[in-house]
Image (cartoon, rainbow, N blue to C red):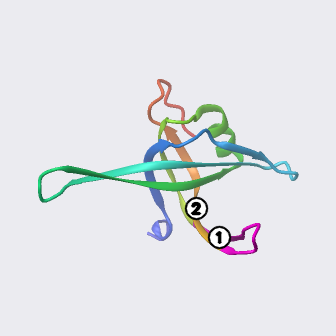
């Protein structure tokens, strides 16, 4: 059970192509977001859909896989962990964000179901 302490699994669609960053250290980083939807029916019987956006980052081998096989609009299933961090805007304001550090990803809407 100790591996379940910080574990996330999501299935959703990419909002844009992954942003690939090659760092000076030789490491590769990709960033992208996915949308997940949930729905319910209100009191009048109308279907209401809520869309949630999740920021995803991946490193190394996983980042290389995403760069090659994952594109905007594609549905993916991913596993990772929550990773909170802070940053400073150009105006000097401190902001906080929680990202999902992706360790595994499977493109679900591709004909070839490659996995990393």
Closest to the observer: 18 or 29? 18
- Residue located at (50% from left, 40% from top): 106
Residue 85, label in figure: 1
Q: In screen coordinates, is 116 left or right of 111?
A: right
Where residue 23 sits in the image (x, y, percent)?
82, 51
Category of crowding for the residue at label 1, using alpha-carbon neighbours closer than 10 angstroms: few (below 14), some (14–19), many (at least 20): few
- Residue located at (65% from left, 32% from top): 68
Q: Earlier in the sequence, mark 2 or mark 1?
A: 1
Q: Which residues are magenta?
A: 83-94
Residue 99, label in figure: 2
Where residue 44 sits in the image (x, y, percent)?
11, 55
Residue 56, label in figure: none
- 57 in relation to 17, above or below: below
**On the image, which quarter does residue 40 sit in?**
bottom left
Circles 2 and 1: CB atoms closer than 8 Å: yes
- Residue located at (47% from left, 24% from top): 111
Quarter of the image containing the N terminus?
Answer: bottom left
- Residue located at (58% from left, 52% from top): 103
Closest to the observer: 100 or 79? 100
Q: How many numbered dots are placed on residues in this image?
A: 2
Closest to the observer: 67 or 60? 67
């Amino acid at each position: 059970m100790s591996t379940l302490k910080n574990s996330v699994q999501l299935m959703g669609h990419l909002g844009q192509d992954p942003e690939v960053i090659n760092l000076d250290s030789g490491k590769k980083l990709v960033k992208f977001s996915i949308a997940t939807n949930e729905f319910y029916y209100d009191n009048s019987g109308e279907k209401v859909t809520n869309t949630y956006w999740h920021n995803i980052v991946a490193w190394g081998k996983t980042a290389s896989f995403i760069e090659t096989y994952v594109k905007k609009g594609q549905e993916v299933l991913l596993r990772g962990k929550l990773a909170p961090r802070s940053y400073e805007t150009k105006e000097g304001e401190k902001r906080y964000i929680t990202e999902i550090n992706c360790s595994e990803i499977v493109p679900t809407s591709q004909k070839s179901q490659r996995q990393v």
